[in-house]
Amino acid sequence: MVKILGGVVFKPLIASLMLTSAVVYAKPMPLTAARYAQQLGVGMDVDWARTERGIREFDPLVVRDFKAKGLTHVRIRVAGAPTEARLIHLRKLVEACEYYGVIPIIAYQADAYKTDPSASHEKELINWWSVVARYFGQTSPLLGFDLIYEPADKLNHNMASLNRVYDKTIRLIHAIDPQRMIFVAPRMRAAPEDLSALKLPAQSQNYVLAEWHIFPWGPLKSGGKYPWTSGTAAEKAAIRARINAAVRWQHKTGHASWVGGWAPGESIKMTPVASQFAFARFMACELKKAHIPYAINADTQFYDGEEGAWRPAQESRARGTLNPAKSRARGTLNRLSLMRYP
């Protein structure tokens, strides 16, 4: 019934107020791994917490410069024990990323464990993440944890240890923060063909993603290197095969994935050449077609921390990884433009 008092119709007014209240108090949709992966876009591996120089030269304005270039996440590589000084430095990095709208991912080197996956080193790795997870608690919801930076060495022959460490560490971290985003990588330096060997906790698709690696600077190994020549059918097929391996695993398991690092060129000491630009464009385009976020390796290649500026020669080499479509349309050989993610 519509009640009228003083000529005012109340039923529509009450309904309107109820609708407004529902909108105001509606809970935001929870962040899932799939949505998180979409937000990652294109990022860069950084040494801000791994080397003495990286730690010394870091300035929050670097994050501002990265964001201005279109980078939306950073993979913060960390080595060494989780000392108070290191934790404080990590907090500084994370806060700078949050301030400038860049997603931070902490990636632990775990060199001792990779070299010797013994019970003592398993315990040491799990304890490392226990300290870090407790330090951040349930703060910084976009902060991700990349448990082991590219498992290799003796881990290539010890999947039982790798899966055991992943299972224990994931459960430990999620007991502290059930919604913390966690990345796990397969053996053989995170080869996508080995994703199927991972044994992840049941019903973990919403908060556990896979990290996998693709060629350092080319698709086919030759003489210890991975050159890209003219973009032959075999070279393109090799790239697509690795991406498709990851996509098939995603469809089968329901887990999202992320390429933790690939490089559009071999070294900052080498002058960029046309074949490198072509490789960078093709790689970026194929990953974007598959809707897989990725990070470029690495910050020291493209950014001079001491000067606080992009390296002029390498800036053009990397720009192609931001926006390959625009780079190709303009006819430029610009590798940083390949970094933009649709």
Image: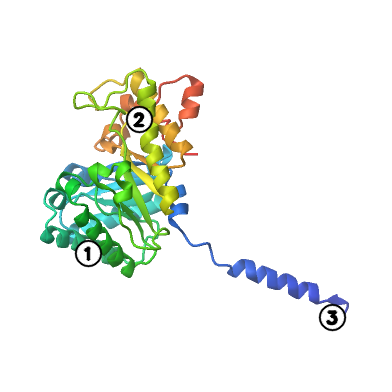
Q: Is residue 58 visible?
A: yes
Secondary structure under the numbered disc 1 in the rendered image: helix
Q: Position of residue 67 (x, y in %)?
A: 41, 42
Residue located beneath label 3 in the image = 1
Q: Residue at x 19, y 27 (%)?
A: 224
Few, some or many C-alpha atoms within 10 Å of disc 3 (few <14, some 14-19, many ≥20)? few
The first of marks 2 and 3 along the sequence is: 3
Mark-to-mark CA distance, 2 and 3: 70 Å
Residue located beneath label 2 in the image = 238
Few, some or many C-alpha atoms within 10 Å of disc 1 (few <14, some 14-19, many ≥20)? some
Q: Which mark is residue 131?
A: 1
Q: Residue at x 85, y 81 (%)?
A: 3
Q: Indicate the amino acid at tag 1.
A: Val
State which mark lies toward you, 2 or 3. 2
CB under 8 Å between discs 3 and 1: no
The first of marks 3 and 1 along the sequence is: 3
Mark-to-mark CA distance, 3 and 1: 62 Å
Q: Indicate the amino acid at tag 3.
A: Met
Secondary structure under the numbered disc 2 in the rendered image: helix
